[in-house]
Image (cartoon, grey):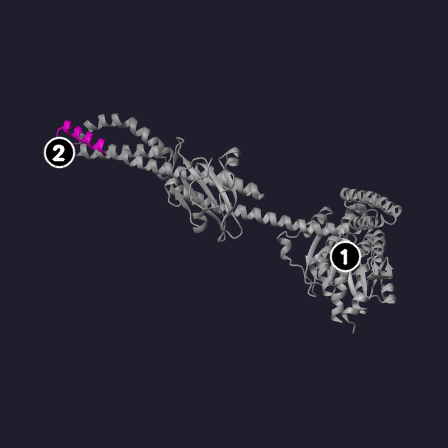
Amino acid sequence: MVSTNELKKRKIQLVLADDHHVVREQLEARLRREADFEIVGVASNSHETWEETQSKRPHMLLMDPLMRDGLGLATLRQVRTHFPDLVIVVLTAYVDTALNMQFREMGIQSILTKGIPSPDLLAQLHAAYSAVGFRI
Amino acid sequence: MIINQQDFQQPISIQWKATIIRSIRPLRQNYNIATMNTYSLKRLSLLLSALCIGAVVFGFTAINPVISWAQAWLRFGILLSAAVGFNLWLFRIIEQHEAEAQRRSEQLAALHKAALILTKEVDLATVLQRVVDEARGLAEAQYGAVGVLNEDGNYIDQFITSGITTQQRALLGQPPRGHGLLGVLIRTGEPIRIPSISEDPRSVGFPPHHPPMRSLLGVPISFQGEILGDLYLTDKLSPAGKVTAFSEQDQQLLEMFATQAAIAIKNAQFHRQSQQLTLLQERDRFGMDLHDGVIQSIYGIGLMLEEAHDRFETDAEGGKDLVSQAVEGLRRTIHDIRNYILDLRPERFQGRDLREGLAELAREVRAHSFLSIDIQVATEDLPRLSPEQTVEILHIIREALTNVRKHARASQVDIHIGSRSDALLLTIADNGIGLDLGLIDKGAGHGLHNMQERAQALGGKLSFTNPESGGTSVQLEIPLILTSSLQNL
C-alpha cells in the first residue's frame, strides 16, 4: 500500500520512448527540468522500449507507439501484458478512431497528441499517475 | 312525285356541291372524328345540321303540296340560323375548354422542365435558388422566396429570394423569421392562398423599404412527412402585367413542383453529407501519412523553442543555438510539406518490386494497427510487372488493408499471391465481421470505389466475397498478356 502523501513525495520514474530524435531529445530535456520526474530510461525504437521497461521497471512509460520499425504497437501490447500496473501514456501525432478504441480496450486512458503544450502534458502525466495511484 | 323530286334536286345539288366537297375533304383526309381538330368538327357539324334541316323541310314540302316553296325556304332559313347559333355557342364552350387544356399541358411541360433543371444541381444553395426562380416562372409571379426552416422546424433559418434586386434585399436587412403570414404556413403546414395580404388579419405588415406586395401563395416543401421549408410566391401577374390573385390551378401546380423541389433539396443535402464523409476518410488517410514526418518535426521544434525560451536567462548562447536549430528544422519541414503536396509520397512504392512493396505495406500495417499480417507468395518466380502495374497493385492492396484496419474488426489478415500463365492472382482475406456486400452495389465507400478504378485501369478484375469461414476476401486478377507479349519483343 502506498499512501497519497508518499505518492506526492515520490519522484515519478519514467521511461521515454519515441523514435523521432528531435522530439525525444527535447522531451527528455523538458522532463529532466521537472523535479517530480526522474527519467530512468530513454528508448528510440521498439526493441529498446521493451529492454528499458523490463530492466528499469519504471512507474510510467511515455511512448509514441507508432514507430517506424513497425513493432511499436506489438511492443506496447507486450508491455501492457507483462506489467499491468505500469502507467502508460501514449503521446503520438495522430490517432484514428479505430486505434483509439483499441488503446482504450487495453486500459490506456491517457492518449495525448503531439502539439499539446508542455505544461498541459506535465499536468496530464501527473493526472495519469495519480489516477492509478489511488487505485493501488 | 319522282319528277318533282328531280325538279328541285337539281338546284340544291348545285348550291351545296362545293360546300359538301369542301366539308368532306377534311373527313377524307382524317377519318377519325376523335383526332379531328375543332375547326373541322365545327364545319362538319354545320354541314350535317344544314343537310338534316334541308332534308326534313324540303322533303315535307315535296310530299305536302299545300305548303308553298317560299314558305319552305323561310322555314329552312329560320331553322338553319337557330342551328348555326346553337352550334357556334356549343363550339365556343368547347374551344374555351380546349384552350384551358392547352394551358394546363403547357404548365405541366413547364413543370417537367423545371423539375429537370433541379435534378442537374447538387449544390444546396444553387438548388434552393433554382427552386424559387423556377417556381416564380411557373405561376407567373413577380416575387418568390424559399424559406428553409431551422432543425426544429419552427422558424425560418435561411431565406432565398427571387425577383427583388440585391440592393432592395440589402435595404431590407434581416430576413423574416415567420411572425406574420409566412409563419401561418410554418405552423399549420397547409398551403396558404390570399388575394390581398394587407387585408388579412394575420398579416403583421411589411418592414420599411419592402416592395409592396398584394397576392400571396405559399406551399410547404415536405419530404416523407418532414417539412424542409416553405415556398412563397407573391403578386401573380396577368398577361397584361397587372397584379391579380393566384388561382386554384396555380396552387395545384406549385404543390406538384414543391414535391419535386423536396427531392432535389434532400438530394443536395445527402450529397453534402457524403462529401463530408469522404473528407473525413481522406483526413484519416492524410493524418496517417503526415504522422511520420511533419507533425513530429513541428512538435519537436516547438519543444526546442520552449527550451530556448527557458534557457535565455541562464545560458543565452545555448538559447540562441537552439533557436537556430529550430529555424533549420522549420526549413526542413517546409521542404517535407512541399514534397508531400507535390507527390503525395509516391516514393513509397516507386522502384520497388511487388515483394518489396508488400514488405513495406506489412511494416506500415504493423506500425499503425494491432493486425497480424501474413504474406504468402505461392509462385517461385513472380511474373514480371511494369513499375506502373506494381505501384497500382500495391495501392489496391494498401486500400484493402486500410479497410480491414478500420472497418473489419479483424485480428488477422492473409495476403496470398499466386499466378497462372496469363494472370496474377491476389487474395486478401481477413477474419473480421465481413463486408456488407450490398455496399459495393450502392457504390458506397470511397476506398472500394478507388480500388475498383485502379483494378479497371489494369484491365483486371476485383471481387469481394464473404467466405463461409467468416471475414472478407478480396480477390484481384490481373491479366498478364500485355506484359508477356512485351517480354517476347
Decide: few, some or many residues near mark 2? Use Cα within 10 Å; few <14, some 14-19, many ≥20.
Answer: few
Q: Which residue is mark 2?
A: B64
Q: Residue furthest front?
A: B313
Residue B444 in the image: x percent, y percent? Answer: 64, 52
Residue B69 in the image: x percent, y percent? Answer: 15, 28
Considering the image in quadrants, where does the C terminus of chain B appear?
Answer: top right
Q: Residue B431 sits in which quadrant?
A: bottom right
Q: Examine the rendering and report whether any part of residue B113 can be seen.
A: no
Above or below for A26 versus B113: below
Residue beneath the point at 57% across and 44% down: B124
Q: Confirm or deny contact between disc 1 and disc 2 (CB under 8 A).
A: no
Q: Taking B100 as reference, is B292 left or right?
A: right
Q: Predominant secondary structure in magenta?
A: helix
Chain letter belonging to callout 1: A
Q: Examine the rendering and report whether any part of residue B467 can be seen.
A: yes
Residue B279 in the image: x percent, y percent? Answer: 67, 49
- Depth check, mark 1 against mark 2: the one in front is 1
**Type of the residue with mark 1:** Leu
Above or below for B58 versus B273: above
Kindly state the secondary structure of the residue where label 2 is placed.
loop
Residue B423 on the magenta segment: no
Residue B74 on the magenta segment: yes
Same subunit, labels 1 and 2: the answer reads no
Kindly state the secondary structure of the residue where label 1 is placed.
helix
> Over which residues does the magenta segment extend?
B61-82
Residue beneath the point at 76% across and 43% down: B341
Q: Which residue is mark 1?
A: A121
Decide: few, some or many residues near mark 1? Use Cα within 10 Å; few <14, some 14-19, many ≥20.
Answer: some
Residue closest to the eye, B296 or B425:
B296
Considering the image in quadrants, where does the N terminus of chain B appear?
Answer: top left
Q: State the separation of the CA atoms marked 1 and 2.
A: 126 Å
Residue closest to the eye, B377 or A44:
A44
